[in-house]
Image (spheres, rainbow, N blue to C red):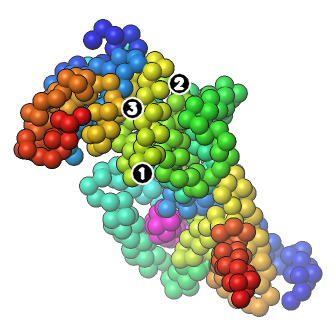
Amino acid sequence: MPLSEFLADLANPDLAFLPKALAVAVMSSIVCGVVGCHVVLRGMAFIGDAVAHAVFPGLAIAFVLQTSLVLGGATAGVVTAVLVALFSQNRRIGEDSIIGVLFVAAFALGIVVISQAPGYAGSLQQFLFGSITGIPDRDLYTVGLTGLGVLGVLLVLHQALVTVSLDRESARALGLRVLVLDVVLYVCVTLAVVISLQTIGNILVLALLVTPAATARLLTDRLGVMMLVSPLVGGLGSFVGVYLSWSYDLPVGGTIVLVLTGAFLAAWLFGPRHGLVAKVLPAVRVHLAQD
Amino acid sequence: MSGASAGGLSVRGVRVDLAGRTVLHDVDLAVAPGELVGLLGPNGAGKTTLLRAILGLVRPRAGRIELAGRRPGRRRHGAGYVPQGHEFAWDFPISVERAVLTGRIGRLGPVHRPGVADWLAAGDALERVGLAELRRRPVGELSGGQRQRVLVARALAVQPQVLLLDEPYTGLDLPTQELLARLFSELAAEGRAVLMTTHDLLGAVDGCSRLVLLNRTVVADGPPAALRDAEPWAATFGVSDRHPLLKLLEVL
């Protein structure tokens, strides 16, 4: 399908769900792109995955009770994120183990809850793999406002979060409340995950959080640039993903993730300084010149 | 010890328990402005714990700590801290200058926007450690010695009267150690109270104005020339008085 036809479909009032899905996908991947920079730089990708699991019981309960999925997921995710931040201050058990215990338990709870709902199999699939249909108007606003809130918090706390990421102990010695900042960051990750879940699905949301940020990291050594490139990659990837998914009737979440993965591989191969080609090519040239 | 309260560091009768175990007891220690004091002891002697207590990161069960005449608080206390190099995330995409600027975070307003004074302080600190030329370089591209100097500059960015260095020579080659040792002597000579933990006994004997031997408590405290006896060294490090290390110290 040519792009013009896709744009026409976006404007078609009979297909009103399509622009909504696109808007939610792009907005959430922009937010994930920014939050993801912190996730990638702190090496907490595992936490992103865990949060995605943890929001599941909230979604399931909201689904059974017929209330807002975004609110339900956010509540469950935030509660578990705070629990992890608190538990992980105890250094005797590693953060990874605590996450392994709490978050998988949360996911299990979600599965048990949702099995009580009618039409269980279909809704489960929608939760796990995402869908472009059935996004209510009010979610559009919830996603937009939540996203803006998350970006605002990250902007205000930027310097503090960077200081903690660089060196926790010194940050503490400098008077920062490291625990509070950890909780705030986890909550931001949770919210970014929750607003992304509907289009991309529970299983794949980690890619939205990690892949654009990892791609941006390959392209630059400057945090400011990284935090612009990452949401750009995420937003564009989501647009292209929704377009391809619509054109070829592919599952939307999977398509977006594959597009983002393509961008990551391209950066890994052709990145300006650290890319494989940039590293190998001079060596090959030298080799040829010697011959 | 009156010199310490005027601007240096003073530790009196400090006891620290960690997880129900007494790690430090009856620690008395003072560092006056202008002094470079080496804090020596075996692994597990409580050196890092003492530094953390001085920084206010662990609360002593007993005793009193004063930094430039003030109790260690969470904010704006007068100590600059140089942690061990591995505490810092060197693969973070940040320039030298901005990494140093994070040392000012306790002095910034609620949204932590650095102002002119903060940039100037960071610039001065970089100038002081000789990294001004490299200030825009990503920290990941620096050598081991340059990285250590970034950490020192970050500590200096708050213009501290007391400087705490935790194992600053670990993993560095000898010329780099020598360069840093000179820097630390100069920083002390400029009127700062400098306390440094180190495993480099030889370097400490040579470069420090005073040595404190620590093993759970202060075993000996004095200028290197006064610590010629093998006995306190053997007691602190738990080795026999025939250990080759002690012979080396006797030669000096």
- Judge the density around disc 2: few (<14), some (14-19), many (≥20) Cα neighbours within 10 Å: some
Residue name at image x 54 percent, y 74 percent:
A202
Q: Nearer the viewer, residue B136 or B63?
A: B136
Chain to which mark 1 belongs: B
Is B194 magenta? The answer is no
Corner quadrant of residue B20: top left
In front: mark 3 or mark 1? 1
Q: Which residue is label 2 attached to?
A: B159
Name the outermost residue toward the front. B251
Q: Report the span colored magenta.
A: A44-68
Mark 3 and mark 1 lie on one chain; the one further toward the N terminus is 3
Q: Quadrant of the C terminus of chain A?
A: bottom right
Q: Percent position (x, y) of residue A284?
A: 69, 83
Q: Can residue A12 be seen in the rendering of this structure?
A: no
Task: Specify the amino acid type for callout 1.
Answer: Asp
Chain to which mark 3 belongs: B
Q: Are marks 3 and 1 in contact (CB under 8 Å)?
A: no
